[in-house]
Image (spheres, rainbow, N blue to C red):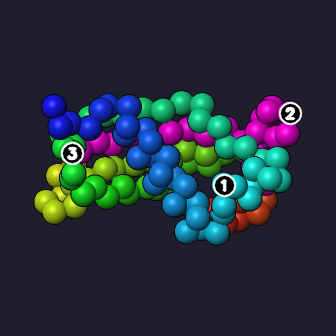
Amino acid sequence: MGIVYYSKYFVYFEMGRIEFLRDMGISYAKIEKENIFLAVADAHCKYKSPAMFDDLLVIKTCLSMMKLARIEFSYEIRRVNEGTLIAEGSTLLACLGKNKKPIAIPEKIRKALS
């Protein structure tokens, strides 16, 4: 049908989140080597307009909340050439340690995101 499949938007959110963190000086790969994991605990998406095959999209990612062991990001996906809102959503991430149990967000990550 030429329409982007609905689950792909969560992949786009992840891409936006990874680049947001990279811009803040945080590498997902590097923190995982230090046994710090950011696991998605909740995810939401509101579909506003379909993205079509070969559309150029921009993903706006914002840090919307940070607590002791949780970080929430919000997202907007827009079509580049006309600015049409395609989708908006959020993900809530839990900070986990080596044993995959919740831990406080390490100070270096907290500081980079402040």
Q: Specify the quadrant that holds the N terminus.
A: top left
Please tell me which of labels 2 and 3 falls first in the chain.
3
Q: Residue at left 76%, top 63%?
A: 108
Residue behind mark 3: 53
In primary-sequence order, the first of circles 1 and 2 is 1
Q: Are circles 1 and 3 on residues that touch, CB within 8 Å?
A: no
- Camera-near label (1 vs 3) is 3
Instruction: Identify the residue at image location x=73%, y=44%.
Output: 37
Quarter of the rendering containing residue 96: top right
Check whether the beta carbons of the residues at disc 2 and disc 3 lie within 8 A of each other: no
Rendered position, 55 above or below 49: below
Q: Residue at x 60, y 31 (%)?
A: 41
Residue designated by label 2: 99
Viewer-proximal residue among 56 and 104: 56
For badge 1, the amino acid type reads: Tyr
Q: Residue at x 26, y 38 (%)?
A: 4
Where is residue 6? Give x, y as percent. Answer: 32, 31
Point out which mark residue 28 bears.
1
Label 3 packing within 10 angstroms: few (<14), some (14-19), many (20+)? few
- Measure the C-alpha gap from mark 1 to mark 3: 29 Å
| Dot 1: element | helix
Residue 91 sits inside the magenta stretch: yes
Q: Point out the stretch of residues depicted in magenta.
A: 86-106
Label 1 neighbour load within 10 Å: few <14, some 14-19, many 20+: some
